[in-house]
Amino acid sequence: MGSTTRGRIDKRQAILEGAFTVFARQGYAQACVQEIAAEAGVAKPTVYNHLTDKATLFRHAMEESARTALEERLAALEPLARPGDDLAATLTDVGHALLRLHTGGRWCALRRLLHAEIAHFPDLLEIIDRYGPDRLDQALADRLARLALAGRLRAADPDLAAEQFTSLLLGPLEARTRLGTRTLEDTELRELAEAAVRTFLAAWG
């Protein structure tokens, strides 16, 4: 890849990151392209050269952030490929990592923007289909199916097991965070993960 192409890709990436930061801070309606250009460290015409208008910029910024968020979650599942002797500890580590990501700034901002703008941008549903919770559950189900084949979990329905594991993790968050207005300490996230794993293994261990 030539330096010119690489530079163009890097600049586009900076614009998308800057755009998401501004949209997350201001909301779609209040965000302006000049502020996005300043956040990205580029000139305003450069933004338009890469992404033709504000609506296109918003869609691409949302897609890129959703893709990054999914990649982070898939990486958090990796320990399940080699869980070692203590499956409960590995599941707890994975659950804790997922909770930290779910309560992190990027995912919270994504959720807020999706809820606020889905009526104006119904095609955002396609982003949810490509990079949303179902994709994480599919990857988790694959890991759990392999553990079931190895005799580490009950060999039943890995899709249901994955759905229940993520529900046990994420279910308490709305109340605990007071609809996202309260930040949980890391120790509390760890305790939530431990409780979720205890319940999960009582059913599926």
Image: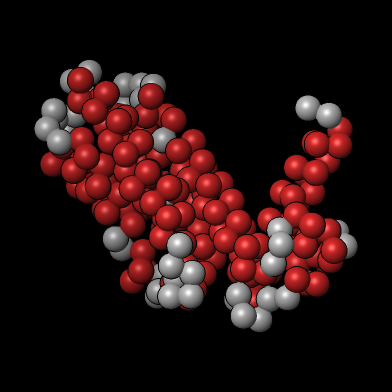
Q: Position of residue 145 (x, y in %)?
A: 24, 28
Q: Quadrant of the N terminus?
A: top right
Q: Quadrant of residue 15?
A: bottom right
Q: Quadrant of residue 201?
A: top left
In the rendered image, the vertical position of residue 159 relative to residue 144, given as above or below: below
Q: Quadrant of the C terminus?
A: top left
Does residue 63 appear anywhere in the picture? yes
In the rendered image, the vertical position of residue 49 relative to residue 165, given as above or below: below
Q: Quadrant of residue 24?
A: bottom right
Q: Position of residue 10 (x, y in %)?
A: 77, 44
Does residue 105 appear anywhere in the picture? no
Q: Position of residue 124 (x, y in %)?
A: 46, 62
In the rendered image, the vertical position of residue 196 relative to residue 188, given as above or below: above
Residue shown at 56%/46% (left/top)? Answer: 68
Q: Nearer the viewer, residue 60 or 102?
A: 60
Residue shown at 28%/36% (left/top)? Answer: 141
Q: Nearer the viewer, residue 32 or 191?
A: 32
Q: Nearer the viewer, residue 63 or 204?
A: 63
**Residue occupying the far top of the picture:** 150
Which colour assignment does the render follow? secondary structure
